[in-house]
Structures are given as structure tokens and as C-alpha cells.
Amino acid sequence: MPGDYFDIPQSAQLKVPLGPPPGPNPQEHHEPARPISGIGFKLAAIAAQAAEQSCARDGYAITVAVADASGNLKAALAADGTRDNGIYMAMHKTATVVAFKIPTLELRERIAKDPRLIEQVTPAMSLLPGGVPIIKDGRFLGAIATSGASAHEEEKCARDGIAAIFGQL
């Protein structure tokens, strides 16, 4: 998945410089922020909270992941009482949406009609419903995915997350 660094040996992790102590960052050492590819952190956090609250109102404790257009995780939430692997499942769903630019539920339907599509699915993806693209004016901005409810409920909550930020995109 984008951003995974679990393949770095622990011995190498111990050699990573820690940088300066906490406090203001002097301007001469300030690195420019990386450009955002699609949705940014603030809107991703709002969308994730809105999706979680939507499912909570319906009685479901879910996890939510929001990724930018490049598949980088921007926000993730796990409501109390969710499964231990819920965030990872939601992240796998966002990876699927980023790759195919369609909801995971729609991808399942397309694979049923054209089984050859399954060849494009990688181990970092999930075919479970609940992943939805964030698109405005035909431009793909990212993906939001939920996990922990029924398939149609997950997609509804993800869409409610998008609706909460749509006017700000």
C-alpha cells in the first residue's frame, strides 16, 4: 500500500536520524511541503468523521480511510468496538478505488461481467464493497472507504462523508 514502510528492518530503523528537539522549526531548515494530489488532510478528516457519524446514527461502529488521488492515506478513524483489521481493510478498499476510479461495489459487478478484470487486482486491494471515489467536475480527487457494516450501509456512509465536503472541493 502507498506509504507502507514495514519492510524496513528494525536494525535500519534504529539508524534513522531523530532530527532537532521539539519546538519551532528554523526557516533555514524548513523543507517545502509536498504538493497535494487531490484531497488534503483537513477535508479528508472531515469526510472521515462524517462517514463514521453517519454509520453510528444507523447503529454501526466502523472504520474509515481516506486517500488522496495518488493513494496516499490522508485520514483514518476507527470507532470504538471495531475489528482490529478494520483500518487495513478500509485502506485496501481505497487502493482499489484509486486503481480503478470506481466504487468497489461497481468493480465487483464489472468483474462478474468480465472475469478477466480480476487479473488487475493486486494483493493490496480489496473487492469488498464500501470504497467510493471522490470526484468533482470529472476530476478524481481521492477515495474514501468504510469497513464494519453491511455492504450497502458502508457505501452509504462513505457517500455521506463525501457529501460533507463536496462544496469545499
Image: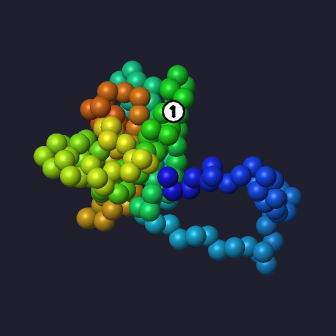
Viewer-proximal residue among 128 and 27: 128
| Mark 1: amino acid | Asn
Q: Residue at x 50, y 66 (%)?
A: 36
- Residue at 61% x, 70% y is 33
Quarter of the image with the C terminus is bottom left
Q: Residue at x 44, y 48 (%)?
A: 124
The x and y percentages for residue 101 are 30, 57
Task: Please say whether residue 51 is visible from this viewpoint.
Answer: no
| Residue 72 x/y as whole percent | 50, 57
Q: Nearer the viewer, residue 156 or 94?
A: 94
Above or below — where is 18 with respect to 151?
Answer: below
Camera-side residue of 78 and 26: 78
* Coordinates of residue 25 in the picture (x, y in percent): 79, 67
Residue 32 lies, with reference to residue 15, above or below; the image says below
Question: 106 above or below 23?
Answer: above
Dot 1 surroundings within 10 Å: few (below 14), some, or many (20 or more)?
few
Q: Is residue 147 left or right of residue 78?
A: left
In the rendered structure, the answer to whether residue 48 lies left or right of residue 141 reads right
Q: Secondary structure at mark 1?
A: loop
87 or 157, nearer to the observer = 87
Which residue is found at the position 38% from the left and 51% from the top? 122
Residue corresponding to mark 1: 85
